[in-house]
Image (cartoon, rainbow, N blue to C red):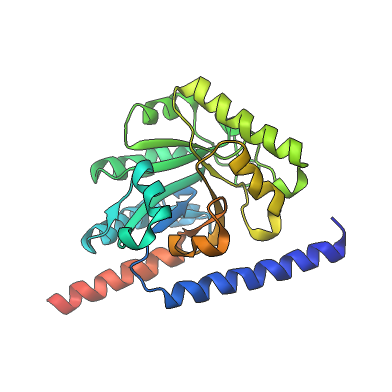
Amino acid sequence: MTPLRVRLHREYNRWYKWLLRWCWSIQGKDAPRVYMFHSVVDTKEQVYSQFAITKESFEQFIVQLEEQGQKAMDADMLLKAIDKPCKYANHYCITFDDIYDTVYTNAYPVLKKYNIPFVIFVTDELVGKVDPWSKMPMITKMHLREMLKDPLCILASHGTEHKMFRDYTHAEAVKVLVDSKRILAEKYGREIELFAFPFGRRVEVSNDAIRCVKEAGYKCGFSALDGSLKQRWLSGRWFLPRVLVDETYCLKVIGYRLKVIGNRL
């Protein structure tokens, strides 16, 4: 892409995110949400970026959702909530991108403890390797297979490689999407219905790539844009918004929880 096109894409992405947040603010707090996580680390010292939170914060976040009376969604319920979001107010879905090994060691025990379904968006080529950016180990094949024995764990696609979809031609994008669907199904014996774009911001995904998700046979696609499922009319079924949960977001939620508890005493 030329420098001018990159600048235009960034400006478009900035205004698009603002519009999503504005729509969220006027549609109430009871809209169904899809929460996005990456790595769940042991200590605050290991929080390397907005893509990592501590296991303590993660569990307190889950506890807060449960205390608010919100209901976790599995894949079937999630697909219904996309079509009829008003019917699924106060529902949520937990998702993980990339799948670090800490998802198995730190997040999975919490989700199992509270019986919470969760979606893992897997990039097959990263399984068993080390993330070159954070230097953290990705999930091992053994741990991935162990989680997939649990019906709470929903396997989904994150592409065959962790690459921006704006760099693919139409044919290449369709091939990556179809191949990922097939490879994951053959390796792990699960039907693959959901997809999430690597990176996933509007500037990093072309309109053509979004259309390819439908063409490849997925039932929906997810972005990294902030918002609730009530905004599906704005982003479309193949580029649905999610809520990135980092330490800052967790602290806001946990702080609200502590305030409520204090008011009850």
* Vertical position of residue 38 compared to residue 121: above or below: below
Q: Nearer the viewer, residue 55 or 116?
A: 116
In this view, which residue lies farthest toward the left?
A: 265
Number of dots carrying numbers = 0
Query: In the rendered view, does 79 fall on the left or right side of 109?
Result: right
* Residue 264, quarter of the rendered image: bottom left
Q: Quadrant of the N terminus?
A: bottom right
The residue depicted at 61 percent of the width and 36 percent of the height is 216
* Vertical position of residue 19 compared to residue 84: above or below: below
**Could one spot residue 125 in this view of the protein?**
no
Residue 260 drawn at (x, y percent): 22, 74
Residue 136 drawn at (x, y percent): 55, 41
Query: In the rendered view, does 130 fall on the left or right side of 53?
Result: right
**Could one spot residue 30 in this view of the protein?**
yes
Residue 66 drawn at (x, y percent): 24, 57
Q: Nearer the viewer, residue 112 or 219?
A: 219
Q: Quadrant of the C terminus?
A: bottom left
Q: Nearer the viewer, residue 38 or 72?
A: 72
Residue 261 drawn at (x, y percent): 19, 72
The residue depicted at 74 percent of the width and 49 percent of the height is 166
The residue depicted at 21 percent of the width and 61 percent of the height is 67
The residue depicted at 76 percent of the width and 42 percent of the height is 168
